[in-house]
Amino acid sequence: MPLSLRRGRVTAVTERLDGLVRLEVDGIACIAYPELTGDVEEGDDVLVNEQARLLGLGSGGFDVLHANLTRGLGLDAEPGAHVMKLPYTPVQHAVRHVEEDGELAPELGGLPVVCCTLHSQVLPVLAGLGGARCAYVQLPGGALPVGLSDALRVAGVETVAVGPCFGGGHAAVSVASALAWSASAGFDSAVCSIGPGIVGTGSRLGHGAAAAAEAANAARALDGVAVLAARVSDADPRERHRGVSHHTEAVLELAFGWPVVAWPKGWEAPETIESLAEVETAGWREACAGLPLSHMGRGPDEDPRFFEAAYAAGALARTLRAS
């Protein structure tokens, strides 16, 4: 399907964040990524992509700025960059990648790598890591811009945008090189996740959660320890996500040599998962207090098992690094 572009004028700039601007174009909510479009001001003549909003898709509550015709033409590329993000697309742009900036570690040396299937797991995972120095690695399969994540702004961790993902503090061509860079930089652990939202078709394997299997495979191949944050819920109205989600099962099916699945101590263990590691999660609520936890509009009171399971993955990774 072709792009659905319309021309309009910026009627309001409502919020400026690191890597993200929220605005209105002709009174309609819109977001912009200044890394791609340059700065944006009220009154600018712009092009926006309105397709998701017109189709009523999950990511369609707003338009996305495609080009700023007033002040976004003829922008300079990042100095020294020659590897393209989103190559051969209308939004291709050159970015400096970690692979170009020095020798990467040949292996991970036991680095714990927490593999998430949803972005809403990231904050409780980080809480479970308890302040360990952590690199966040964003994988394709959800939102591509790292700057869309309010959770990462709260977390304040180093970020690496993999493949077509963009806007991170660093960029990497592959998840393998992102993890090797994390080991080279001396991080205590790495947390891999797709961005906010998830690509999904309702099918067994056609969803963004499968990216966690790629991360787990890369971690194991490079002598790291892959920990899977299980997606677990008693509150999800959809049967395929109730209990242990089919997303978790798909990752285990696709991962060579199963990653360790963190499982809160005292929970009944599912018979379908062989590689469980029980984790003490007492105090998870206190550790997560003050964090903007949200999953499908539900918080820790509405869907506690979801957040406790994610916390368990971080807590397990913390003990693995300590040992």
Image (cartoon, rainbow, N blue to C red):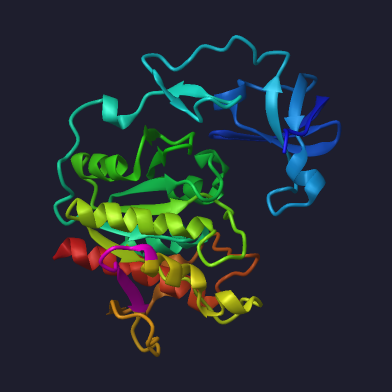
Residue 319: x %, y % from top left? 22, 67
Residue 13: x %, y % from top left? 73, 31
Residue furthest out toward the top: 74
Left or right of 28? Residue 300 is left
The residue shown at (21%, 27%) is 102
The residue shown at (57%, 55%) is 198
| Residue 257: in magenta span | yes
Residue furthest out toward the right: 26
Q: Quadrant of the C terminus?
A: bottom left
| Residue 153 visible in rendering | yes
Left or right of 93? Residue 172 is left
Q: Quadrant of the rendered structure where residue 106 is?
A: top left
In the image, residue 81 sits, relative to residue 162, either above or below, namely above
The residue shown at (38%, 53%) is 192
Q: Nearer the viewer, residue 67 or 155?
A: 67
Q: Nearer the viewer, residue 148 or 88?
A: 88
In the image, residue 182 sits, relative to residue 33, either above or below, namely below
Q: Nearer the viewer, residue 105 or 279?
A: 105
Q: Quadrant of the rendered structure where residue 212 is?
A: bottom left
Q: Quadrant of the N terminus?
A: top right
Residue 90: x %, y % from top left? 61, 24
The residue shown at (19%, 50%) is 222
- The boundaries of the magenta stretch are 254-263
